[in-house]
Image (spheres, rainbow, N blue to C red):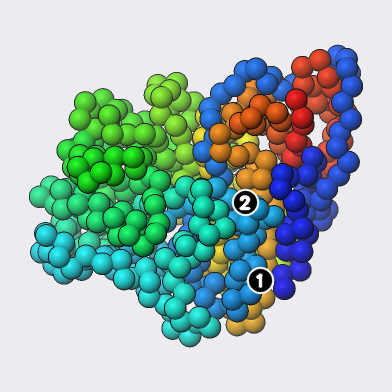
Amino acid sequence: MIPEALLLLALAAPPAPFVQSSAAGDRLRELPAPRFRKGAPARGPLLTVHPGDARQTLEGIGGALTESSACVLARLPKARRDEVLDLFFGPGGAAFTLARIPVGACDFSVEGRFSYDDVAGDVALAHFSIAPDTRGFKGALDPAYALLPLVKDALAREPALKLVASPWTAPAWMKDNQDWYGAGRGGTLLPRHHDTFARYMVRYLQAYRDAGVSIWAVTPENEPMGNGGQWESMEFTPAAMAQYVGGHLGPRLREAGLGAVKIIQFDHNRDANALAFSEAIMADPAAAPFVWGTGVHWYERTGPGGSAVLETLRSRWPALPLLHTEGCVDAISLKENAPGGTFLGWRNDAWWWRPGAADWGWRWAPEAERGDHPLYAPVHRYARELLEGLNHGLAGWIDWNIVLDRQGGPNHVGNFCAAPVMVDTATGDAYLTPLHAVLAHFSRYLRPGDRIVRVTARNPGALLATAARSRDGRHLAVIAFNPSDRPITYTLQVGGSRAAVAIPANSLQSIRIPI
């Protein structure tokens, strides 16, 4: 049994009216609901929710289903594995409604360097097979457990789960470097194989459908700007991606009767490249009609600032929903995160709440960008990015791996990262990190079809907040975060009613209010 799971699995659906998590030890602790009364707000910090000023419609909150997560879960007894999956997809857990799946190999594959058709020159895709997603792992307690069974387990708990599928690379033989990665670059898709790769994606969607799994959306490529050739990747220019989407991927999906599968363009960091790709693709008359939305990651910075790009994307292309498709606590093997090789965050809740974590940019960012990568508190980063992202247009938010081992893997290139649940595969000990509670504060209270509404603040100090109106119009959800080291008492104003709410130092609250 996972001790921390007992409280979470006892949570009922719908969620409790008022829950709190904090550095002091609260984990979605249920509190008495705030008492509202008629009247204008008192002096002091004020959050005013404007239920009539509705913004974007939410698609959901979730995490990624990777081969690495499947490998860790395969090493647990089935009862423990089910328990962990319930924490993410069960109605008494975080109740995730979005998930992302890599198409073929990525850094969070156990061995990497594979696709679904590795027969060079097989333009007809006669050898295409999703068998790699059904292969188990050496030394696992359940040798039959793999990525596809993991996806099915998630769907069994949440049949309406929306799955976003992203390729890290085409098969090596379709690329100019004839390799998965290396020599400082990931390689590019050869123009003569733009259509081959589009048909490859169609075959993937059909194979998953035949296996009982419907994919909601695809991205043309994960991180088209590349990763310096460190693991599976494939680089696109904005013009090349527009050509691929408009001339091949979109038409091939339509011809195959898969036109309902959404195409989410870009799928990389919130920086100038997000604007350049959006401009090129949405200005292309062949590509633009096929694009549903824009995907972004957060790795360009650890501090505030990403919302400016979201605002520009929202204002320039208001019809395109924005999704955060990947983010995580990365580079946990750096000495700042793992002195002596031991990860400081393992069974150490305090590490997640206080500044001290280093990301990739702490060591490797160009000097001119180093200031965007200060040491940070993982809980603060997650809470801030979710709150500010939703306030600036995000319709959904997908975390990276749902489960990893205590080292932050397995990862075939040593790119170790943290996850909401981390497992000591030698002992079966599973650690529910504070990130799980942060995500549950959002995923349990913000549901698909809800509408983000405007929140204004007066003298807020460090207080951050967002709010949403439920799809049926009967409730408001308000999520507030106090990252400061002092408690704050604020007035929560909804229409002509107000409530005094005390939020402790370093804490996160979710409030569900009937309207």
Q: Is residue 323 left or right of residue 135?
A: right
**Kind of residue sitting beneath label 2:** Ala
Number of numbered callouts drawn:
2
Question: Residue 304 placed where, x, y %?
Answer: 58, 37
Q: Is residue 128 left or right of residue 361?
A: left
User: Is 431 placed above or below 436 here?
Assistant: below
Q: Residue at x 28, y 34 (%)?
A: 290
Question: Residue 361 placed where, x, y %?
Answer: 49, 51
Q: Quadrant of the C terminus?
A: top right
- Local SS, label 2: loop
Q: Residue at x 64, y 30 (%)?
A: 472
Question: Residue 16 placed where, x, y %?
Answer: 78, 44
Q: Quadrant of the N terminus?
A: bottom right
Q: Residue at x 31, y 48 (%)?
A: 221
Q: Nearer the viewer, residue 110 or 96?
A: 96
Residue pointed to by mark 2:
95
User: Is 366 placed above or below 128 here?
Assistant: above
Residue pointed to by mark 1:
430
**Kind of residue sitting beneath label 1:** Ala
